[in-house]
Amino acid sequence: MHVTAEIVDQDDDETKIKARGTMLGRLTVAGRLTLVRYNLADSNPAHAKTDEQVRTHLRKLFALLYDPTRPVEKEEVEVEAEQE
């Protein structure tokens, strides 16, 4: 399956994404995602420590996936997605 995704709209709190999946050139799945960003402490200040722990953990995961010294071309990302 070849999956593509594009950011349709983005603001301070939300990112809207349109995604499509094709097999053998035929559309097999399509959808839209809305990702919302917020801190738990915004609604309950007692959760500020949890926010920091989550951010720290996600930064460690991102470091495993991203090498800032290696430029990534759009075509390369699409080929890697096709092979999975």
Image (cartoon, rainbow, N blue to C red):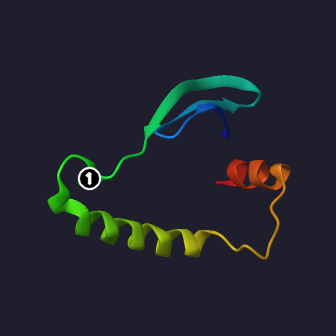
- Pointer 1 local density, CA inside 10 Å: few below 14, some 14–19, many at least 20: some
Quadrant including the C terminus: bottom right
Residue at 75 percent across and 53 percent down: it is 77
Picture layout, residue 53 above or below residue 74: below
Horizontal and vertical percent for residue 27? 67, 22
Residue type at mark 1 is: Leu
Circle 1 residue: 40
Specify whether 62 is left or right of 35: right
Foreground pick, 36 / 61:
36
Residue at 48 percent across and 75 percent down: it is 60
Disc 1 element: helix
Residue at 44 percent across and 67 percent down: it is 58
Horizontal and vertical percent for residue 38? 36, 47
State the image quarter where residue 49 is shown. Answer: bottom left
Foreground pick, 75 / 36:
36
Horizontal and vertical percent for residue 35? 46, 39
Foreground pick, 29 / 47:
47
Foreground pick, 82 / 56:
56
Horizontal and vertical percent for residue 79? 78, 51
Specify whether 54 is left or right of 27: left
Picture layout, residue 67 above or below residue 11: below
Residue at 57 percent across and 74 percent down: it is 63
Specify whether 44 is left or right of 61: left
Question: What count of labels does the image hold?
Answer: 1
State the image quarter where residue 41 is shown. Answer: bottom left
Quadrant including the N terminus: top right
